[in-house]
Image (cartoon, rainbow, N blue to C red):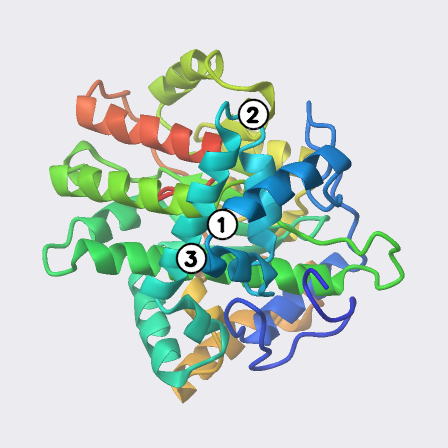
């Protein structure tokens, strides 16, 4: 079966998934907040929903891809850990002129990515690989989990200012940066697997969640953060992740964005497919307006992160990976304990973790910052699996 297992089963400590082992307590709590999940609808201007099975013409395309794959590539799409890759690739490359070769290139790159970064060992819960993954996720503390929308899409937040600082560190090799991002992306897949299990098991369509929501927080991003080293590593991660993880973003919201980014987006929109542009929203610093937009897009208040004016306690991804040391368990228990004895739906963000809205600044015309702005827009537009949206 595509994902394996039945629906509606609770996630517990050390629950294994075909991607990475999850520490289930946070995931359980966030899914319980949602109750019964709705079936993801078709995206605007699209003729299918993400969870729809491949149609006849798509199946023909999939067969053509399989015929061109290496034995390792064919094995990849048969393995539960990467079976989702075929559907993502078929739909992600559907409009390409040379789509068969481009799709094969993507899947073969995914084979190499999984081999190079020990992702298959991670899916099996190998302890050495798990320890390394935990170390990498702790480096990427800028990547955070906020909850699920009404369809079960995980909501991922990236604090771009922190990501820039990480990618500019001289003592961390580029390959380590890319590997950490790959581990982040596999964890996103595990969260989607958890949401799929939570869907009504009686659903005859066996609803599966294949996409996530990506919130790009531009707060405190400054010109001097965008060094040549950052740009080089942005480029490498964009090339690596986007090739291996097409079609993973349901929506991308760029918040606390400088005013000129909105202007840039107006220009870029005219170059892109309407389905692509419908996935991206460039929002400013007005948290009330940002919150209203996310609520209108079926993201409940308790899943909207603080940077968007919501009530979610977003947590670092490192706290979702398997079980670790006692200090992590203690920290996790504190994070998921309801405040003041309230139920999960009544939990509000503690005052010490609420971030104040940034002070409005004069828009800068720095070419370096504009380059990052363009990268943010491109990342959200093409799927959100890049450096600025795993």
Residue at the image position 84 percent from the left and 64 percent from the top: 201
Residue 385 visible to the viewer? no
Which residue is tagged 2? 95
Q: Are marks 2 and 3 in contact (CB under 8 Å)?
A: no
Residue at the image position 19 percent from the left and 40 percent from the top: 232
Q: In front: mark 1 or mark 3?
A: 1
Residue 69: assigned label: 1
* x, y percent for residue 294: 61, 37
Which residue is tagged 3? 111
Give the vertical position of 102 relative to 20 (above or below): above
* x, y percent for residue 244: 43, 48
Nearer to us in this view, 268 or 113: 113
Compared across the picture, whether 164 is left or right of 382 comes to left
Write down the quadrant of residue 132 in the picture: bottom left
Nearer to us in this view, 198 or 210: 210
Compared across the picture, whether 134 is left or right of 248 comes to left
Compared across the picture, whether 268 is left or right of 78 comes to left
């Amino acid at each position: 079966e595509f994902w394996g297992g039945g629906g509606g089963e609770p996630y517990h400590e050390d629950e294994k998934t075909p991607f990475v082992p999850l520490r289930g307590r946070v995931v359980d709590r966030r899914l319980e907040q949602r109750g019964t999940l709705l079936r993801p609808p078709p995206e605007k201007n699209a003729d299918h929903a993400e969870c729809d099975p491949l149609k006849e013409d798509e199946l023909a395309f999939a067969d053509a891809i399989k015929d061109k794959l290496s034995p390792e590539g064919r094995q990849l799409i048969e393995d539960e850990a990467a079976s989702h890759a075929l559907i993502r690739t078929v739909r992600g490359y559907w409009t390409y002129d040379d789509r068969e070769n481009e799709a094969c290139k993507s899947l073969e790159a995914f084979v190499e990515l999984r081999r190079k970064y020990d992702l298959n060992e991670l899916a099996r819960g190998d302890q050495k690989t798990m320890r390394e993954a935990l170390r990498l996720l702790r480096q990427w503390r800028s990547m955070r989990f906020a909850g699920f929308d009404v369809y079960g899409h995980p909501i991922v937040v990236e604090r771009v200012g922190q990501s820039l600082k990480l990618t500019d560190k001289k003592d961390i090799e580029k390959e380590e940066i890319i590997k950490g991002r790959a581990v982040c992306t596999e964890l996103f897949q595990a969260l989607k697997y958890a949401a799929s299990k939570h869907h009504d098991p009686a659903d005859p369509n066996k609803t599966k969640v294949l996409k996530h929501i990506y919130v790009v927080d531009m707060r405190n991003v400054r010109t001097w953060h965008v060094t040549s080293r950052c740009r080089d590593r942005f480029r490498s991660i964009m090339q690596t992740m986007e090739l291996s993880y097409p079609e993973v973003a349901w929506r991308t919201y760029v918040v606390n964005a400088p005013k000129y980014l909105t202007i840039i987006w107006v220009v870029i929109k005219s170059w892109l497919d309407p389905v692509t542009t419908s996935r991206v929203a460039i929002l400013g610093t007005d948290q009330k307006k940002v919150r209203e937009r996310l609520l209108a897009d079926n993201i409940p208040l308790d899943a909207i992160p603080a940077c968007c004016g919501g009530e979610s306690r977003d947590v670092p991804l490192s706290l979702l990976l398997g079980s670790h040391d006692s200090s992590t368990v203690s920290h996790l228990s504190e994070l998921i304990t309801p405040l003041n004895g309230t139920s999960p739906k009544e939990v509000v963000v503690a005052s010490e973790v609420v971030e104040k809205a940034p002070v409005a600044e004069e828009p800068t015309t720095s070419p370096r910052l504009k380059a990052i702005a363009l990268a943010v827009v491109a990342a959200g537009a093409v799927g959100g699996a890049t450096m600025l949206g795993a």
